Image (cartoon, helix red, strand yellow):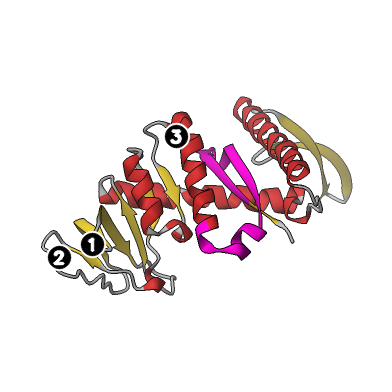
């Protein structure tokens, strides 16, 4: 038994700041997939007033018909990584199937196509060097802008790595959902304060002194070297 967390964050100076999160029990997933989907939709309903027309970026686990339909119904701008492993059908306006085929190094766009023949989206795919498979992104924005926005999602991944390695959020042993939410709140607030304060210190050029020992003409001397704060 455990808990899962859904967080909504925005990029900030090479990392990300959390603006919303919710916790739900892993039993939700164990019961049925529709229960998980309802949790996703609840998040959209709750953050709608907060984000307004700011594009929302989602990984491929959110690549399903009901979720996309809710985003469009609520008139939200979205960028979602297409899950190609479920062999979903993409069609054009004449119901003809569209083949999403790429070669290494290629970038291709498919404008005004339909996810499962129902949901109108723009799709862009790219297969960059060093990657085992191409990346496909669906959006209701202009395709290239959607891809650019999706790549910024990696900033959020870096922040979650920080939260795990520095604050140990993945090792929390709370057994009650309300206590888990409180512990996560404290961890996220601490991280945000550290991130913002650290960035402000970096901007004004706060320095600290470190000792540098050198040996010149066999005479030891001590001097100071300025080192600017890069990350906190």
- Specify which label sits upstream in the sequence, 3 or 2: 3
Residue labelled with disc 1 = 117
Q: Residue at x 19, y 70 (%)?
A: 97
Point out the image quarter for the N terminus: bottom right
Q: Which mark identifies residue 75?
A: none
Residue in front for this viewpoint, 127 or 183:
183
Task: Let me know if residue 6 is in the magenta part.
Answer: yes
Q: Magenta segment, principal secondary structure?
A: strand
- Label 2 crowding class (10 Å Cα cut-off): few <14, some 14-19, many 20+? few
Residue at disc 2, secondary structure: loop
Residue 20 position (above or below residue 57): above
Q: Which residues are magenta?
A: 5-34
Residue at disc 3, secondary structure: helix
Residue labelled with disc 2 = 95
- Label 1 crowding class (10 Å Cα cut-off): few <14, some 14-19, many 20+? some
Q: Is residue 160 left or right of residue 55?
A: right
Residue labelled with disc 3 = 48
Give yes or no for contact between labels 2 and 1 (Cβ–Cβ under 8 Å). yes
Residue in front for this viewpoint, 90 or 218:
90
| Image coordinates for residue 154, horizontal then vertical, percent | 51, 52
Residue at disc 1, secondary structure: loop
């Amino acid at each position: 038994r455990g808990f899962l967390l859904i967080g909504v964050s925005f990029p900030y100076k090479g990392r990300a700041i959390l603006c919303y999160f919710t916790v739900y029990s892993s039993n939700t997933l164990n019961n049925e997939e529709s229960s998980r989907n309802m949790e996703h939709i609840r998040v959209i309903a709750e953050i709608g007033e907060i984000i307004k027309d700011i594009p929302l970026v989602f990984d491929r686990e959110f690549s399903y018909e009901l979720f996309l339909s809710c985003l469009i119904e609520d008139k939200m701008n979205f960028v979602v990584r297409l899950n190609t492993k479920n062999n979903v059908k993409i069609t054009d306006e004449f119901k003809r199937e569209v083949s999403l085929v790429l070669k290494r190094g290629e970038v291709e766009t498919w404008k005004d196509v339909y996810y499962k023949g129902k949901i109108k989206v723009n799709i862009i795919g790219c297969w960059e060097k060093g990657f085992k498979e191409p990346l496909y992104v669906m959006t209701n924005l202009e395709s290239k802008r959607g891809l650019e926005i999706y790549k910024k999602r990696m900033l959020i991944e870096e922040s979650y790595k920080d939260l795990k390695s520095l604050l140990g959020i993945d090792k929390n042993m709370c057994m009650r959902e309300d206590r888990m939410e409180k512990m996560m709140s404290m961890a996220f607030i601490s991280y945000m304060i550290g991130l913002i304060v650290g960035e402000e210190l970096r901007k004004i050029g706060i320095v600290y002194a470190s000792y540098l020992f050198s040996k010149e003409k066999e005479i030891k001397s001590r001097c100071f070297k300025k080192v600017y704060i890069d990350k906190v």
